Amino acid sequence: MLSDAGEDSSIALACRAIGHAFLTSKVDTPETRSKRAVTYGQALKATNMALEDPLMQSQDETLASVWLLSLYELIVSPAKRNHPLDFSADTHGIGSWIVHTQGLVSLLRLRGTSHLRTPLARGLFWLIYNSIQVRCFITNTASPSESPTWLQELEKGLTQDEMPAYRLCVYGHRASTLCASIRQIINQWTTTPPSAAMEIIAEAECFEREMQQSWDVGTGSPGPETIADSELNIRLLCCRTFFHAFRLKFQLTLLELLDKMRIETLDMHARMLQDQFQLRVETVQSAADEILACVPLLLSTDTSSGSSQKLTPRLWRDGVRLLWPLRLVALWNATRDDQKRAAKSTLLQIRDEVGINPTGAFLPPIAADFAAKESALVA
C-alpha cells in the first residue's frame, strides 16, 4: 500500500510523522520537536482531506492513515525518558487515541462489507478491529453493532492463516459486549432487578465454556514451557497475547460485579460468592502468566552489551501492542506482586529502549474503593 502511494499521500505523511515522533523521543530538541509538529500537521491535513473526499474516504489508505495517527498519539507523551513512570490506576491520558479509534469505527461502517474481499483489506480489518476492541474494553462500551455482519462476511472466505485473528475478533466482540452489560448492571444497581446479576453471571459462564472449547484454554494455551513453539508465528503469538488480555479484562469486570453482590447479598450466599471471587482471581493470574510468557518473544532481550538485559523488539509496533496487556497486569490488584513487577519492568524497558512512553498508554479505569475491597477479600 505504502509503495503505491505518493510521498505526499496521507499514509506516507502519517508514517513520516510517526518516524519524527520516535526520533524526538530519542533526541528531544527544539528542532526535532518542530519537525515532529510540522509532519504531524501535514499528515493530519492530508488525512482530513481524504476523509472529506467521497472517493477517498472509504479507501484502504485512508483507513490506515487514521489508524497510524492513533498510534502517533500513543508515542507522543509529555513525560521525559528519565522521569519516573506514573503507575497509578486512575491516570488516563488516552483521550486523543480514543477519538481516533472512534473514527475508525465510523470508517468501517462507511466501508461496509464490500471492502472485506481483498487480502489487503481483510488484513487491515484485523488490525483496526483489534484497536476498536481495546477501546471498547477501556471505555466499558459494547462492541459495534455491525460486528456480527462484518464477521459473517469475513467467515465466508476465511483462510487457515486468518483463523486466529477471526477467533480473537469473535471473542473480543462477545466479551466486550458482556462487559458493557455487566457495567450497566453495576452502574444501575439500585434500579436493577436482583436476578439480573445472577443471569449475567450464568451467561458469562456459558460464554466461557464455549470459548474454552474454541481456544482450548488450559492445556493447549502457550505457557512458559511451550511458548517457544510459537516463536516463528508472530501473528499467532500476538493473537494469543490479546486473547488473554481480553480474557483478563473480562474476568476483572466479573470480579467487580461479584464484589458488588458480596456487599449487597444475604449472608447465606457469602461463601458461594467468596469461592466465585477466588476462582476469578486465579483465572486473572493465569491470564497474566500467559501474557508475560509472550513478552520475551515479542520483545526479545540482548545481554551482549553487559549483564543487564536490553530490549530488542523485532519491530517498534510490538512495543505498542504490549502496552495495554502489560498495563492490565501491572495495575490491577488481582494479579500477583511478581506479575506486577515483571509488567512494570517491561513497561520501563519499552519507554527507555523503544522510545514509547507508557505514561500516555492505555489505562483501565478502576475505582480506588474497589481495589481496596479486592485486596481485603483476596487476603
Image: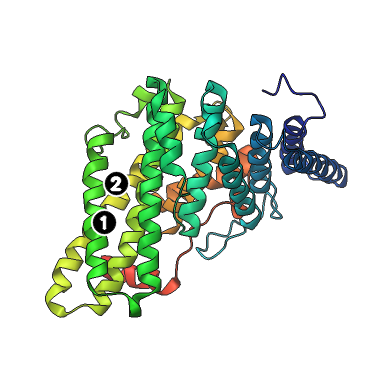
The relative height of residue 295 versus residue 376 in the rendered view (above or below) is above
User: Where residue 290 sits in the image (x, y, percent)?
Assistant: 35, 40
Q: What residue type is labelled 1?
A: Arg
Q: Do the residues labelled 2 and 1 touch (CB within 8 Å)?
A: no
The relative height of residue 357 versus residue 309 in the rendered view (above or below) is below
Among the two numbered marks 2 and 1 on one chain, the one whose residue lies closer to the N terminus: 1
User: Where residue 342 sits in the image (x, y, percent)?
Assistant: 43, 47
Query: 10 Å neighbourhood of mark 1: few (<14), some, or many (≥20)?
Result: many
- Label 2: element kind: helix
Residue 237 visible from this viewpoint: no
Task: Compute the Cα span from label 2 to label 1.
Answer: 10 Å
- Label 1: element kind: helix
The relative height of residue 222 versus residue 372 in the rendered view (above or below) is above
Residue 369 visible from this viewpoint: yes
Give me the disc on residue 280: 1
Residue at numbered disc 2: 286
Q: Which amino acid does label 2 sit on?
A: Ser
